[in-house]
Amino acid sequence: MQWRNTWSRWGIVSVGLHWLMAAAVIGLFGVGLYMVDLGYMDPLRNVLPDWHRSVGLLLGAALVLRLLWRFVSPPPAPVPEHTRVEHLSAHAVHWLLYGLMLAMVISGYLISTADGREVAVFDWFSVPAVTGDVQGMEDLAGDWHRWLGWTLIILAGLHGLAALKHHFWDRDDTLRRMLCMKLRQSRSPDRQ
């Protein structure tokens, strides 16, 4: 498999970033749901939020890397069997997912820095607070973070269902291109 995207398929960098970010989003969502019900005496009460913040900020860095990589190595051409509406909606959903992930990282950062303290990322480095101590920011950003999280996970779920629909119902190469599987039909010399 090639590092860069080709005309017909995603390269290993794009595939790796896609699945790494998908796992991070699902994991962060699950941990976030679990954290809201932790009791004061629960030993995970001091561990999970730090882990959640650290992974969330690393997800933000991965998002920036993924967007930069998208300009260095443009996405493959649309699958020929897709209609124009499918192509445009897939394009819109991808950019909406990117926007939601960015908004999640920003709102999480605002929650974490509402009291003016920096955020430690796994004790490797710290991200400074840029807002200072802002009254009410934690609650407002928390509300946004919760609703953005639900929107992101629902949209990601629909994205996954659409990929399965293309694979099992339409029997096209949409999912195969992201799973590094052999493609069904040869349409280009760069096919493997």
Image (spheres, rainbow, N blue to C red):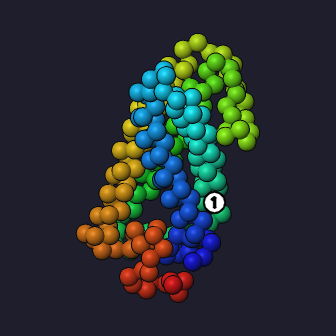
Q: Is 29 or 155 nearer to us in this picture?
A: 29
Q: Position of residue 66 (x, y in %)?
A: 60, 55
Judge from the rendering whether residue 173 lies leftward or rightward of residue 67; answer left or right.
left
Residue occupying the point 32% across, 57% down: 161
Vertically, is 24 above or below 189? above
Q: Is 180 or 30 nearer to us in this picture?
A: 30
Q: Position of residue 187 (x, y in %)?
A: 44, 84
Q: Is 93 or 53 nearer to us in this picture?
A: 53
Judge from the rendering whether residue 189 lies leftward or rightward of residue 182; answer left or right.
right
Q: Position of residue 183 (x, y in %)?
A: 42, 80
Q: Quadrant of residue 131?
A: top right
Q: Residue under circle 1?
A: 69
Say which amino acid is labelled 1: Trp
Q: Position of residue 178 (x, y in %)?
A: 46, 68
Q: Is disc 1 placed on a helix, strand or loop? A: helix
Judge from the rendering whether residue 179 lies leftward or rightward of residue 108; answer left or right.
left
